[in-house]
Amino acid sequence: MTYVLDTNIITAILKGNEKVKQRVEEVIKHGEEVFINCISYYEIKRGLLAAKAESQLERFRSFCEELGLLLLDRQQVFDEAAAIYSTLKIRGQIIGDADILIAALAKTGDLVLVTDDGDFQRVENLTVENWLA
């Protein structure tokens, strides 16, 4: 399996959550891949820059180098995002655009999204795990 981390999971790791850090290490040890998505990268980096959190920025930079970054670099991701948006809008269950793009990236890459955000449960056929639960 290949995993992609949502913002709240990355934040937990940066704040020292041992349970989540151990889970990442365990998954990598078993030969599976774990990535950071570019939306979460942006969300975290902007917050750390605004807070002038230099030591956390350095930890985040190292963490990103270790795992790698998934980019929104295929039309298929945006097509899937539009489909997710449409489905949720029709149902009256819309979620934020950032979450829609993260979900589309995970779905089109056949990735497991690791998140503590229940909004993702609204997205059909999205595989989700919560390593904070």
Image (cartoon, grey):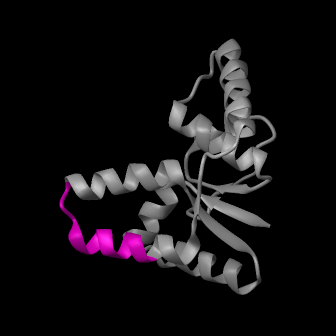
Magenta stretch, main secondary structure class: helix
Q: Residue at x 60, y 38 (%)?
A: 101
- In the image, residue 61 lies in the stretch drawn in magenta: yes
Q: Is the residue 108 above or below the residue 65 in the image?
A: above
Q: Report which quarter residue 28 is drawn in.
A: bottom right
Q: Is the residue 79 above or below the residue 62 in the image?
A: above
Observer able to see residue 16? no
Observer able to see residue 99? yes
Q: Position of residue 99 (x, y in %)?
A: 56, 39
- In the image, residue 52 lies in the stretch drawn in magenta: yes
Q: Quadrant of the N terminus?
A: bottom right
Q: Position of residue 124 (x, y in %)?
A: 78, 35
Task: Using residue 64 as the reference point, say whether residue 94 is left or right of it.
Answer: right
Q: Residue at x 76, y 84 (%)?
A: 30
- Outermost bottom residue: 29
Q: Count of labels shown?
A: 0
Q: Position of residue 133 (x, y in %)?
A: 59, 61
Q: Position of residue 45 (x, y in %)?
A: 35, 56
Q: Is the residue 95 above or below the residue 54 in the image?
A: above
Q: Residue at x 22, y 70 (%)?
A: 54
Q: Residue at x 50, y 47 (%)?
A: 39
Q: Is the residue 37 above or below the residue 84 in the image?
A: below
What's drawn in magenta, residue-wise? 51-62
Task: Name the residue nearer the viewer: 132 or 28.
Answer: 28
Q: Report which quarter residue 122 is drawn in.
A: top right
